[in-house]
Image: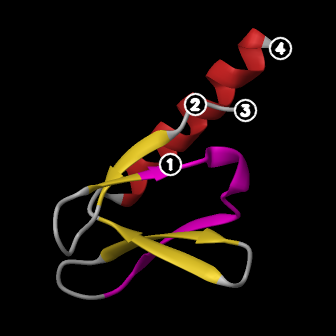
Amino acid sequence: MPKLCKFTSPIDGKPVYVNPSQVSVVYTHKGEPPDTIIGFGKDFMLGVKEGLDEAVTMLDTAMSEDGRKG
């Protein structure tokens, strides 16, 4: 299992942990400031405080670290 990625809830600032192997999409929803959304399949979307580039980098790094171990 890949290392869990720690993100920040935009509502209360608490940590949110994500399994990168279950993420199907990461996108920015327009607004002021724009929201970064992590999607798991079609049924669950999670908003995070981190920016789009930072979120994608964190998820990519966790997946590549997992690949090197196997």
Callout 2, which amino acid? Lys
Residue 56 disc label: 1
Callout 1, which amino acid? Val
Quarter of the rendering containing residue 70: top right
* Mark 4 lies on residue: 70
- Compute the Cα span from label 2 to label 4: 13 Å
Q: Quarter of the image containing the N terminus?
A: top right
* Mark 2 lies on residue: 3
Looking at the image, residue 57 sits to the left or right of residue 16; the answer is: right
* Mark 3 lies on residue: 1
- Residue 11 position in % (x across, y down): 20, 75
Q: Earlier in the sequence, mark 2 or mark 1?
A: 2
Q: Earlier in the sequence, mark 2 or mark 4?
A: 2
Q: Earlier in the sequence, mark 1 or mark 3?
A: 3
- Residue 22 position in % (x across, y down): 71, 55
Q: How crowded is the residue under tag 2: few (<14 C-alpha within 10 Å), some, or many (20+)? A: some
Of the two numbered discs 4 and 3 in the rendering, the one whose residue sits closer to the viewer = 3
Q: Earlier in the sequence, mark 4 or mark 3?
A: 3
The extreme top residue here reads: 69
In this rendering, the answer to whether 15 lies above or below 32 is above
Q: Which range of residues does the magenta coloring cover?
A: 17-30
Q: Is residue 29 magenta?
A: yes
